[in-house]
Amino acid sequence: MLEWGEGIFPQIAHGFLGSGLRARLVVNDERQVLWASEVALALLEPQFPVVIADGALCFERANDPVACQEWLHSVGRKPSRFLVSGAQEDWWVVMNAWRGRLHADTAIYAEFILSHPPYRSSTSGMSKQFGLTPAECDVIDALVRLETPTKIADRLGVSINTVRTHIRRLYGKLGVNTQVQLIRIATAFSAG
């Protein structure tokens, strides 16, 4: 694995490699992990759909090199966001990635946002704190899993308008204006 100062462009990598408690990796086109943050090494384990196995980046427990290779080849110079869901719906990873220079070659810089299952707003204290109904808890739990309102409606057997009404009520109860803010509050309760 790479150590700091071994040819990585400092203006790109300094903030990437040196900041925060986030799961971050640098990989080559052959899936080999060139550098990994301590958080990535600790968290990218088999329960998640993206793992580090034998020094390589893999998708799912089955060590699917084809899906991983397809993803690697789709990463461009501009940052892109990818969602990888696991066989278990509660486990997912959002990957923010871009291609940059590393020595004479290119490498993929990736940051991972991992789900925190089993997350339930009804048991995290959030429901009681904000006075959420069971239906609102179901909707916020689905939003935390990055489900779309359409998928939420289908799964709960309600109309899309009902889901949108629940989302608007959640915004009011939590004092937020966006789903990102809503999810941040929900994940803060899951961490506490």
Image: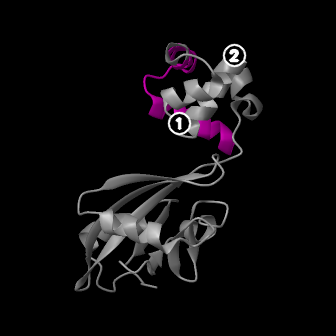
Q: Which residues are magenta?
A: 163-192
Q: Nearer the viewer, residue 56 or 23?
A: 56
Amino acid on which the number 2 mark rests in the picture: Gly
Q: Is residue 174 above or below residue 45?
A: above
> Which is more foreground, mark 1 or mark 2?
1
Amino acid on which the number 1 mark rests in the picture: Glu
Instruction: Judge whether residue 178 is colored magenta.
Output: yes
In the picture, the disc for residue 131 is 2
Q: Is residue 62 above or below residue 134?
A: below
Q: Residue at x 53, y 82 (%)?
A: 55
Instruction: Judge whether residue 123 is colored magenta.
Output: no
Applied colour scheme = one colour
The residue under label 1 is 147
Q: Residue 132: horizontal and vertical position, in percent?
A: 68, 18
User: Under tag 2, what secondary structure?
Assistant: loop
Q: Is residue 93 above or below residue 18?
A: above
Tell whether 145 sits left or right of 132.
Answer: left
Q: In the rendered view of the protein, which quadrant contains the C terminus?
A: top right
Q: Residue at x 58, y 40 (%)?
A: 145
Q: Quadrant of residue 49?
A: bottom right
Q: Residue 100: horizontal and vertical position, in percent?
A: 26, 71
Q: Residues within 10 Å of mark 2 (few under 14, many from 20)?
A: some
